[in-house]
Amino acid sequence: MLRYLPALILGRLVRVLVRIFRKGGGSALPGLILSKIAPGILNRTLSSFRDGLIIVTGSAGKSTTTKMLVAIARAHGKTVFTNPSTANILQGFYSTIIEKSDMLGRISADVAILEMDEGHAELLTRTVSPRQVTVMNVMEDQIDRFVDPELVRETLTKVAARAKSHVVLNADDQNTILMASSVSVETTWFGVSEQLRTEEKNGLATAPTFLPAQPRPTPRIQAESRQGPRVTASDQVFGTIEFELPNRGVHFILDAVAALESARSYLQDDFDTAVAVEVLSSLPPVFARGEVSTVNGEPVEFVLVQNPGSMQLNLDNLDGQPEQVMFAIGRDVHDPSWMWTVDYSNLKHVDMVSGFNAYEAALVLEYNEVEVVAVQDDLDKAIEAFFAMPKPVTGIKTVIFSADAMRRLRRSMGFWSPEEVER
Amino acid sequence: MITLINLFPQHLNLNGDAANVSVLQKRLEWAGVEVQVVNVTSADELLAAQKNIEANPTRSFICAGHGSRAAMRDLEKHAQGLRAILSVARDTGVAGIVVGSSSTWIAATEPTRGARISEFTTVNLDLEDWPSKALGYLNSDIAIAPLEVQNNLIVTLLNGPFFAKNPEWANRICALLGAPVTESAKSKRVDSYVEQIWNLEGDSGK
């Protein structure tokens, strides 16, 4: 047990130094260092929980679903080790261990529930077998990195196939339906009704398989309808379930039923619908997933877009025509080509375009007849100018940003680092 | 009227290559030129599009983008028609662009695969009447030149909105279509963004 002590001391020291010299900013550095000098600590830690490891993965919806699942598990009395919503790659897991473990690398919790990036989930599950895997979906995402949606499906199929006791899959994605044949443990499904699916202007944005449609499995839980924030779902065991969500959009409803099914699969007979519904109805959104924060005394909505699917779903679910919009695309978008696959007809104007890819973003917006008022690639200056605008007459300021722009914006505005955003 | 033909845009748009058509459409419209877009989505439409370019080779433009593995498999049933229309386009001097995986329909032999390259790339060329440089994102393992021009057909591995980032190439296509584009306030504005993108991602910006 003592063999990880020096590595953890060094990791914590680096973490303290980073916090001193990069106030408010997170860093992957402590996790990177720990992964180099004590790579075995991750497997040892993740294998140490009595109830095992639960993974939530897929192209989109991981953060919100994980947050909901963790909260439901905790409300049932479980102690949970989880990762902050931005730390879903291996380095992030190491960083989380630095933060959450004692000096011997031990973490006191019943279960580990982790959100995992698709590629990193496959790497990690080569050596640590998860108890349960939830796969949200496969979208056309990070083609510069993942190359092809079919390869993502194959990768996630491997992850799902490594589950020891249960797999939870999306009944409304042909990709996840195809995965089921490779899974040997019990598989249950979540989904949304046809009525809800057709309410989304551009569908649920899953990657087309261009194969004959597979029959839709019967979900154990299915969201049927919504009335404002109130969602009605039908459950094969518990009948009608009603809960409220703080976010707009069917994709968030899908996250909620994924979380309910994942929680039920984990907790089994201990699962209490009333407790789960109460948790869902009182849970604030994950930051930048429909999150409204106060900046300079006024509410601002932050919307994270990470791939064509999430961009499309979020644009389709804007609250009318926001009067003041900032659009910031950062360095994390290596190949901005995907922005040209999105339908921008819901967005009529943008007051400020910024981020490393400001001019790429401005170019696609202008060609899509979205009025661009100003382009400022210096994010700090753009933030200053945007937030200096008088309060909108109607609605609230809206910031649409990629993950890198989000991190920089939060740091620049003195928000606590995303790595500190707890579940 | 100028016809811009987009071949199977639901299949061949993994990286936004179909936007090449909308970029040309906008630039022509901003210059006051009448233009129509034809999206080809079936065998019958493919045949009709081929007849159209044979009848109006100097007023037609054709775009075949890069498709996912699944999309390319699904389009196998149209492979003969796709090879035919792209060959006719190339051989009769129709202006067009063929991107990534679609280049296999116009290659004499099955292209070999090499190491995958994924980065912004500036290509230097020495072709009469064509711009000498082009910028785009290259994400491919197909072992062919990243950009070449076969008659008036651009064959490239640079994905996404090639004409948006390379307005000189867009203007060259417009000239081939008999609509030399005059600058508009809008085109000046977008082209000023392109200058910044070249500064950032082009050879001089790296």
Image (tube, coloured by chain):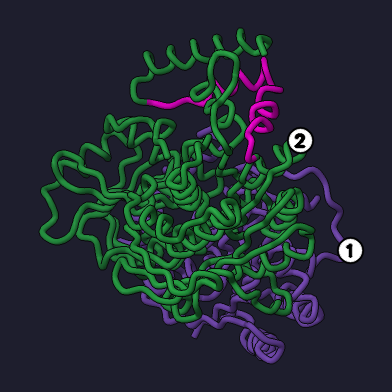
Chain bearing tag 1 is B
**Residue in view at x 69 percent, y 32 percent:** A47
**Residue in view at x 78 percent, y 80 percent:** B84
**Residue A269 visible to the viewer:** yes
Q: Left or right: where does residue A330 sit relative to residue A42?
A: left
**Residue in view at x 55 percent, y 73 percent:** A236
- Tags 1 and 2 on a common chain: no
Count the labels in the image.
2
Of A81 and B17, which appears nearest the observer? A81
Q: Is residue B138 above or below residue B109?
A: above
Amino acid type of the residue that numbered disc 1 sits on in the rendered structure: Thr
Amino acid type of the residue that numbered disc 2 sits on in the rendered structure: Thr
Q: Is residue A317 above or below residue A10?
A: below
Give the percent coordinates (x, y) of residue A294: 20, 43
Colour for chain B in the figure: purple
Of A29 and B78, which appears nearest the observer? A29
Q: Is residue B39 above or below residue A410?
A: below
According to the picture, the residue beneath numbered tag 1 turns out to be B109
Q: Which residues are magenta?
A: A25-51
The crowd level at tag 2 (other Cα within 10 Å; few <14, some 14-19, many 20+) is: few
